[in-house]
Amino acid sequence: MIKKIALFTLVTFTFLKGFSQNDSIKKTNPIIYGEFSVGPASIIENKNRQSALGLGASLNYQSQGSLYTFRYNEILNYSYNLILFIPVPIDNSRLSEFGLLYGRRWLFSGSSISISGGVSINTYNSRLENNQTFEKSNHFGVPLEANIRFFKKRKKRYHILYGLAPVSYTH
């Protein structure tokens, strides 16, 4: 009789424990996405504002509400010399940033809002007056970022690289 009571108690607690664990587990998929940017920028050099080209790329990972970002931004300032009527670009100055950010991201129906902050390493290269050598300076920074993004909620899956890599796109 004691064996039956012990077996009943063991089975009951095992069933209840397993049942309660299955109800409390919430499965969430992490979100990984990348971004690229190209656009006009400006550099203030020797108290003169000069137009430049801004390039950027970032890799983002979201798990639950936390957003982790690795980003690279570069601002290129070029001038052109004509050689046989062909414009040849000359690199005047370059500002590069590598940054790691942490923040929060909130998803809505077809949009998201995120706020992040972190640390960055910034490198500034500038051509000196003799046009042969560069002056280089390195700095640490504290980047702050706020984003609002709009996207289509419905996604359709397809594969690239001969079916090896699944990718989602909005349609």
Image: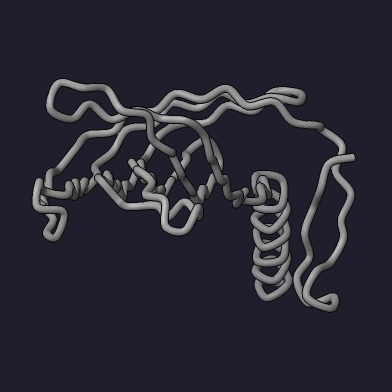
Q: Could you say which is closer to the camera, residue 154 or residue 54?
A: 54
> Which image quarter: residue 148?
top right
Quadrant where the image shows the N terminus: bottom right
Q: State how many labels appear.
A: 0
User: From the image, which quarter does the C terminus lie in?
Assistant: top right
For image coordinates 54% across by 41% down, the residue present is: 37
The quadrant holding residue 160 is bottom right
Q: Could you tell me residue 51's position as x and y percent?
A: 37, 29
* Residue 48 screen position, x and y as percent: 21, 22
- Front residue (pair 54, 16): 54
| Relative height, residue 109 to residue 34 (above, below) | above
Whole-percent x, y for residue 155 in the image:
85, 43
**Looking at the image, which residue is at 42% across and 57% down?**
83
The x, y position of residue 145, in whole percent, is 39, 28
Q: Residue at x 18, y 50 (%)?
A: 125
Specify the farthest residue to the front.
84
Q: How is the image coloured?
A: one colour
| Image position of 74 (left or right of 32) | left
Compared with residue 101, is residue 44 higher up or lower down, i.e. above or below? above
Residue 73 is left or right of residue 153, and the answer is: left
106 sits to left or right of 46: right
Say whether residue 132 is left or right of residue 152.
left
